[in-house]
Image (cartoon, rainbow, N blue to C red):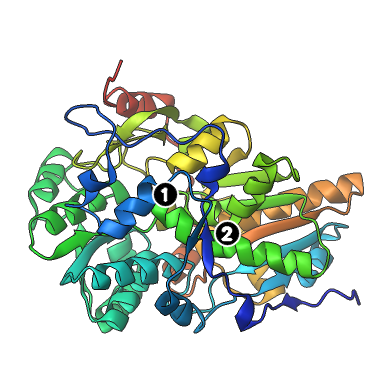
Amino acid sequence: MSEIPYKIYLSEKEIPTAWYNVRADMKNKPAPLLNPGTGEALKAEDLYPIFCEELSKQEMNVTDPWIDIPGEIVDFYKMYRPSPLVRAYCLEKELGTPAHIYYKFEGNNTSGSHKLNSAIAQAYYAKKQGLKGVTTETGAGQWGTALSMATAYFGLDCQVYMVKVSYEQKPFRREVMRTYGATVTPSPSMTTNVGRKINEEFPGTDGSLGCAISEAVEAATSQEGYRYVLGSVLSQVLLHQSVIGLEAKAALDKYGIKADTIIGCAGGGSNLGGLISPFVGEMLRGEANYDIIAVEPASCPSLTRGSYVYDFCDTGRVCPLAKMYTLGSSFMPAPNHAGGLRYHGMSSIVSQLYDDKLIRATSVKQTDVFAAAEKFARVEGILPAPESSHAIKVAIDEALKCKETGEAKNIVFGLTGTGYFDLVAYQKYNDGVMDDYIPTDDDIAKSLAQCPKLG
């Protein structure tokens, strides 16, 4: 038995007290958000009508490497953090690999995922500003669940627009949100102007995160005392999620372990960005080198098949323009079961890191992802979320490469949450009726052709 335990725990005193802002160390800063009407770079105050003021400032902060975490947020973190870094001994044995596999498990809270790390921060700043409530979107439901928990804690109203396909596939996730007091509406709906427009343009659509974002923004800006909050993509969210990477690195350092390969699933970039930020910081400062892999679904491959251009963050085209790897804001992903990864674009931070070749990316098919998920569940005893299972698939692939070469690499991946509300997806896989939809080049080209032309 190795001297490294199955679970590496940090003490409560080792919970990070400051978020790490990787943009401060980036030589090539992410491109600024632009006003869609004028094409001019936005200032923090330009975002105040949509976002909380303090969050708007965090969104624009590219200079401060460390931002203190308010004490009330740290106190809330203590309910479920630090989260364990687990050595996957059983998976290593099953694969017969010399690689050492570790996963940072973020599913040990009631919301079931890493999303709570940012939800509690955003709810805190909304409460501090004296707001009545917040609006948001959710894909698979993890973000909506986390935000409903956070708003209940601070006594705020919470209005969630849930992507229609997930609303129908995951009724129990929806009911958890309602239990915490949230109002949940399937998107696109007929309750907003943009929802009605999208339903007219795409009749019978299953929706997308881009659609739900548009509706949530409209709802926030049309109600006094409300602001919009987002669970991924934005730089402020990646900032809050840096607690994942900071804890992971501290746990590795505790036992003198140097990661070789770091893997995360990639939809909008919050989980991946949070996990890799402290490690990327070392790379940017010339202190270390890592092989970092972003894993996205083949049905929605923004990094591997998208273009690096300015685009709308939402399908309704009401949000600011962000420079990112995108499939086009009008791209409608197939109704696959990794709802949290069904977003047309990628975080500006992750996009810049990818364009600078500090990280690499790959896409994987849905049936291969669920095969890896079931293998992991059977040997490690955790039923993983479909999103997390993208990282599991590639971690297994990398471990098998080590089996061929004999290299004992240290592989670290993010297990963002559990899949106990995703049993319809597992049922379809087990029944052999799950398919692998991959968009054609024409599908992507048509959507990209509608991106704004900025010269």
439 sits to left or right of 375: left
From the image, tell me which residue sits under label 2.
Answer: 389
The answer to whether residue 442 is visible is: yes
**Amino acid on which disc 2 is placed:** Ser
| Image quadrant assignment for residue 96 | bottom right
Between residue 308 and residue 393, name the one nearer to us: 308
Instruction: Check residue 235 in the rendering and tell me which mark sits there, or answer none.
Output: 1
How far apart marks 1 and 2 lie (CA) works out to 24 Å
Q: Within 10 Å of the Cα at label 2, are there few (<14), some (14-19), or many (20+) other Cα atoms?
A: many
Vertical comparison of 103 with 358: above or below: below
Position in image of residue 423 (x %, y %):
46, 71
| Image quadrant assignment for residue 132 | bottom left
Between residue 126 and residue 183, name the one nearer to us: 126
Position in image of residue 100 (x %, y %):
81, 61
The earlier-in-sequence mark between 1 and 2 is 1
260 sits to left or right of 413: right
Q: Report the mark closest to the observer, 1 or 2.
A: 1
**Amino acid on which disc 1 is placed:** Ser
Q: Outermost residue toward the top?
A: 455
Which residue is drawn at the image coordinates 47% and 54% (left, top)? Answer: 238
Which residue is drawn at the image coordinates 41% and 33% (left, top)? Answer: 31
Q: Within 10 Å of the Cα at label 1, are there few (<14), some (14-19), or many (20+) other Cα atoms?
A: many
Secondary element at tag 2:
helix
Image quarter in which the C terminus is found: top left
The answer to whether residue 374 is visible is: no
Between residue 64 and residue 56, name the one nearer to us: 64
Q: Are marks 1 and 2 in contact (CB under 8 Å)?
A: no
Vertical comparison of 212 with 420: above or below: above
